[in-house]
Image: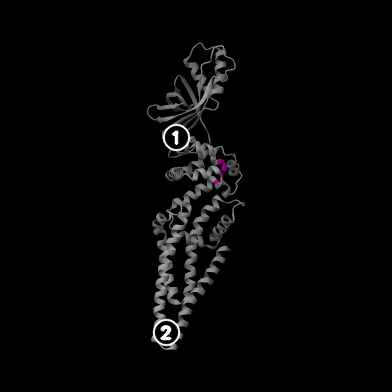
Amino acid sequence: MTIWILALVLWLFCALLGHKQGAIRASISFIGIIISGLLAWPLSGLVARVLRLVVHHPIAVWTLSPIIAFVALLIVFKWVGFSVHRKVRVYYQYARDEIRMIMWQRVNKRVGLGVGFLNAFVYLVLISVPIYNLSYWTVQIAPSDQETFEFKLLDRMGQDLQSTGMAKVACAIDPLPKFYFKSADLAGLVRQNPQLADRLGAYPPFLSLGERSDFQALAQDSNLINAWQTHASFAQLWDDSQIQYLRQNPATVDLVWKLVEDNLDDLTGYLNTGQSAKYDSEPILGRWDVDTTKSLQLMLRTRANVSSTEMAAMRSIWDNAYSNAVFVAGSDNQAFFENYPQFTTPVAGQKNQGPPFTPVTLQGTWQSGDNYEITLAGNGLNKTATGTVGDSGLDLKIGDDRLVLERENH
């Protein structure tokens, strides 16, 4: 319905304008609309460079650049049409008799009326392209009934494009690359399936991002998490303080966008299946939890004469010490050991000393070879570890300890 209303308004407006301006101006405008529409996107990059000097919002720059290029080119054609029309009008006014003048004016207006309908059709096709592009995103990321009027209108117009068949026309002349639509599909997949948030965070290229304080604050934002899980409006998510902080940092936005751009197809497949064709060949990648039972069993094989009392005490300490410990290996060869227990020596004669360890976070790198070579440091600790990945999990020898870790499932 909205597309038919838009078409009716364009036909009435352009027909009346063509009748008023005449055939010459309307015909040159017709040519100008087509040429400007074809050149608007190729020239938008040049316009964007200038526009960024005064407009700092990337979405606004991306949206306005082709519009400004189109309008600037069309103004040139409008000026040419006006100049030609004026010369012809002066000729008939001063070089021909009054009857010829009246006949020319009548023909000029009537032909202009018909050309105006053609102009309206071209305008409708060109306007359908940005509606198609924008609604392709909004239908997927903003489907809530709580959305703002602008989002609802775009959703409605996008659906009407499909029902009227104009979507096929817009798609046929759309200059945007496939990456644009694939990224919209990815955004829609995540937006409409909140349960995929954990799997998204576990994608190997994003693991190191998850260790940054700004992204950890994002994951701990209870208001954002609740809004995400309850399908709150996109505006509410966009205006969240943590989201604002991240999107106002151009370096962070560029980093995340680069990671998505380089892994778009693999990331989409990973979210759908939980398997990464690109990164599953490196088994250490992921988040790993310490399995204290297997770790203690492994230790018993290397230590003799451990009494059941000592074993029970050690199990109690390890269960407590490693309960929140997580080892993270990212695809950028960064390694982290969250809540690694830094054991302390009890002071003789002092009571109520609390747990015999302090949780610290170590950071370093990993390298593959016959075994994984891992270096970790933090809080005065420097650890060198070697590891292998097998059916039982990650066997990690770190310092004097030997740990068995299990991969977190998402």
Judge whether residue 67 is colored magenta: no
Q: In the image, residue 28 lies at what x, y percent?
A: 41, 72
Query: Relative to the observer, which residue lies in front, 275 or 377?
Result: 377
Graded by Cα atoms within 10 Å as few (under 14), some (14 to 19) or many (20 or more), the crowding at tag 1 reads many
Of helix, strand and loop, which mostly describes the magenta segment?
helix
Q: Secondary structure at mark 2?
A: helix
Per the image, the residue denoted by label 1 is 330
Residue at 53%, 56% in the rendered image: 135
Residue at 55%, 19% in the rendered image: 315
- Quadrant in which residue 332 is drawn: top left
Query: Relative to the observer, which residue lies in front, 186 or 153?
Result: 153
Q: Is residue 263 above or below residue 159?
A: above
For the image, the number of numbered tags is 2
Magenta segment range?
191-195
Q: In the image, residue 308 lies at what x, y percent?
A: 56, 13
What's under tag 1, amino acid-wise?
Gly
Q: Is residue 294 above or below residue 185?
A: above
**Which numbered disc flags the more N-terminal residue, 1 or 2?**
2
Q: In the image, residue 113 lies at what x, y percent?
A: 49, 76
Q: Is residue 273 above or below residue 78?
A: above
Is 70 situated left or right of 146 in this image?
Answer: left
What's under tag 2, amino acid-wise?
Gln
Tell me whether circle 1 and circle 2 mark residues in contact (CB < 8 Å). Answer: no
- Quadrant in which residue 86 is drawn: bottom left
Task: Give the mark toward the camera: 1 or 2.
Answer: 2
Residue 253's mark? none
Graded by Cα atoms within 10 Å as few (under 14), some (14 to 19) or many (20 or more), the crowding at tag 2 reads some
Q: Estimate the spatial distance between the alpha carbons at disc 1 and disc 2, rounded to whole Å.
A: 79 Å
Q: Secondary structure at mark 1?
A: loop
Q: In the image, residue 50 lies at what x, y percent?
A: 40, 56
Judge whether residue 193 is colored magenta: yes
Per the image, the residue denoted by label 2 is 93
